[in-house]
Amino acid sequence: MGKTITTYLIDGDPKGTQYAFISNKICQMFVIPRSNLAYLNEQEKLHKPAFYILIGEDEVTKPQAYIGETENFKERVKDHDSKKAFWQKALVFVSKDEDMTKADVQYLEYRAIVVAKQSNSFVLNENKQIPKAPNLPEHQRDAMDEFFEDIRFLASFIGCDIFEISQPKEEHLFYTKARGCNAKGFYNSAGFTVLKGSIIANNCVPSFTWKAKREKMVEEYATLNNGVWIMDSDKTFSSPSTAADFCIGRPANGWNEWKDKDGNTLDFIYRKQLE
């Protein structure tokens, strides 16, 4: 089913301050760079109860985020601006219609942290604990569950995959076993996802150009078990070749390296059959 997204670039910059919403939905997302917090003075909706995500870069290979809720984002972000160094922009989610309550945004925070930890695509150093879900009436909980699905969609719409959880279909799985690895994954519009449980090569060949980054990624996404590195969460790469490089520990053409259970390459399934 198609969706219509309305996006308004407040300062005309696609990387600047903006807001977006889905037609016929009440969830509205504001994207606010840290460099333009002055915009908060102009937008009354951001002085009300809100769910938010602070996004930035960490020293490790994953981006860093902080998930929170507040009764007044304009006031709350002052504390984050003085005490949290990592973040560069905030995603703030409010209701276009009636204001949400404190319990509503607490419930959204609870749902968000649970899903973000399952996704494991961002570092959540300051969200170590999952908060307790507030006691909402059933009808309001259902409404907030629907609101949260819109949050997930809008975050994904601007390229933030903090809530993305892979759900592969068996017939779309591809495998590689080069250099002692035994990895599996699937390909879609997001890239190539290497799945939890995959065994990856213990080391890299001397000519491997991003050895240091791979070693950090291995430590973040895999666990050493009896001398074997096993992925303990999914990891999506921008291309099949980057995914193959990571798993095998050497330069690889992922379009030919990844093969399905019948021996068909990714290239054959997704490109040759279109010729």
Image: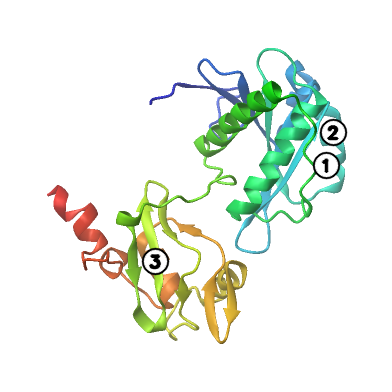
Are the residues flagged by discs 1 and 3 in contact, CB closer than 8 Å? Answer: no
Q: Position of residue 110 (x, y in %)?
A: 73, 40
Which residue matches tag 2? 76
> Alpha carbon of mark 2 to alpha carbon of mark 1: how far?
7 Å
Q: Where is residue 106 in the image (x, y as percent from the top left)?
A: 78, 34
Location of mark 3 (residue)? 184
What residue is rendered at 43% in x and 85% in y?
205
Q: Is there any visible trace of residue 163 in the rendered image?
A: yes
The mark that comes first in sequence, 2 or 3, is: 2
Residue 34: in sight, yes or no? no
Compared with 113, 62 (above or below) is: below
Direction from residue 26 to residue 206 in the image, left or right: left
Asked which quadrant contains residue 32, the reply is top right
The residue located at (34%, 68%) in the rendering is 175
Helix, strand or loop at mark 1: helix
Q: What element carries label 3?
A: strand
